[in-house]
Amino acid sequence: MSVVTDVSPPAVQPRPGAPVWSIVPLLTRLHFYAGVLVAPLLVAAAVTGLLFVFTPQLDNLVYDKELHVARVGPGLPKPVSEQVAAAIAAHPSGTFTSVTPASAPDATTKVVFSVPSLGEKTHTVYVDPYTGEIRGQLTTWFGETPLTTRLDDLHRHLLLGDIGLVYSETAASWLWVVVLGGLVLWCNRQWRSRGERRRRRTEATLLYDLRAAKGVRRTRGMHAATGVWLTAGLLFLSATGLTWSDWAGANFSLALDGLDSRRPAVSTALSGAPSGGGGHHGEGGAAATAGDPAQVDAVLRIARANGLTGPMDITPPAADGAAWTVFENDNVWPVHFDRIAVDPVTGTVTDRSDFADWPLLAQLTSLGVQAHMGYLFGPANQILLAALAIGLLCVIVWGYRMWWQRRPTRTLTGAPPARGAWRRVRPPVLIAGIVVTGAIGWALPTFGVTLAAFIVIDVIAGLLRRRRAAADPPAVA
């Protein structure tokens, strides 16, 4: 019977009790606790994210009737105003909120109605642009179908409402800590050995060591090498996920305000506009009031003449004296997010906000969100996110397996790294670490709270263990 041992070259150990500059022992314990206790949240985030990333294809399957026409018409589509009128006739109880003209030959036009009883959700009526036929109606949330809304809620809240927000933000807040901590620990383990050539150490850091004996050493290699390859993608998912979280996202919004990096708003005010709709005429000479669907065709024509292309949402004014708004919602690279305010009576653009003119941080934030959701680069983006999710699940499984393999023979689970490493860290390093950790804990509240909870639990567990050790009588030889 062979005995499996870890034959890694021994590290140069400092004199016992001597203060050290290295934070590796602290990172080892932090990585262990974060991996064991936070990993279940990361598993939930990875699985639900994997489901969400393929919602475009799922929507096309589940809602084929609503999203697509029965037959591409031989002629041109009907005017958008007629399509809106057909939707209004089929949905007389709601208030016309916006229209998204069909952006592909086989796509339907989406006409959105607000209904007070639905809160943030709306009713979307799908119209065949060639025939004016109503293809169906769905309850949507910011343009998302019921299926996408459900999977989005599953990923962000685990269908638990506001309580579920804690899960997703905690997972995103700890993901980068686990990733960077593991990267430092693995690189330190591989590069601290002497006598190895640089190329050999690089290969050991990035590739599986298939020559390693079965057991914890091989599992560690698979866990760590895979984590190295996933580092950039996982850090990106953590950062972009936090930008629209509740607590860390609020702090991020404060930073955007402080740096004047918000996306510019479009003003819908019309200077010198009369208080009522009388005296103005829309297309065809008919009297027009604020939000008159008959004006949609003029608004769309003006938007296209001013450079807006692809999918776009057209929103009527909320009251007299305001302009219509049109914004592109093409979130596939190269993106189109330009917005304009239109006065259909005078045929002019009264205000605009072009994506190219946004502050750089606002541009990066918007692009990051689209990439996080799998939209930015189309199917390639989806495949990459799926690979990240599956890779993260593999890393977590190997991490738990390694924990199990390291367990003493008489215990159920693996033992954590030894306590007290912080006592040996040199004071300047320890103080700097406390300050930096406190700042991060303020910026990422769920990270700060859960880290404090880990520390309190660890201290209590240590005190209880000491008390039991003191109470046990010494063994008699």
Image: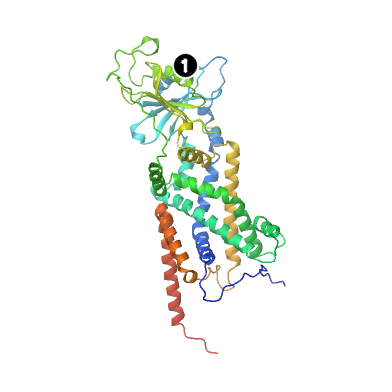
Helix, strand or loop at disc 1?
Answer: loop
Q: Is residue 287 left or right of residue 301?
A: left
Q: Nearer the viewer, residue 73 or 181?
A: 181
Asked if residue 399 is positioned above or below residue 265 in the image, the reply reads below
**Disc 1 crowd, CA 10 A, few/some/many (<14, 14-19, 20+):** some
Scheme of colours in the image:
rainbow
User: Which residue is the site of mark 1?
Assistant: 79
Quarter of the view holding residue 290:
top left
Asked if residue 373 is positioned above or below residue 103 in the image, the reply reads below
Q: Looking at the image, which residue sits at the far left? A: 275
Asked if residue 71 is positioned above or below residue 373 in the image, the reply reads above
Q: Looking at the image, which residue sits at the far front? A: 428
Q: Quadrant of the C terminus?
A: bottom right
Residue drawn at (60%, 38%), measured in percent from left and top?
380
Q: Looking at the image, which residue sits at the far top? A: 285
Residue 124: percent from the left, percent from the top?
43, 29
Asked if residue 282 is positioned above or below residue 455 in the image, the reply reads above
Q: Is residue 212 left or right of residue 28?
A: right
Q: Nearer the viewer, residue 371 or 396?
A: 371
Residue 118: percent from the left, percent from the top?
36, 35
Three-letter amino acid code at the position of disc 1: Pro
Residue 149: percent from the left, percent from the top?
46, 39
Q: Is residue 51 left or right of residue 141?
A: right
Q: Quadrant of the N terminus?
A: bottom right
Residue 315 in sight: no
Residue 13: percent from the left, percent from the top?
59, 72
Q: Nearer the viewer, residue 461 or 244?
A: 244
Residue drawn at (52%, 86%), measured in percent from left and top?
475
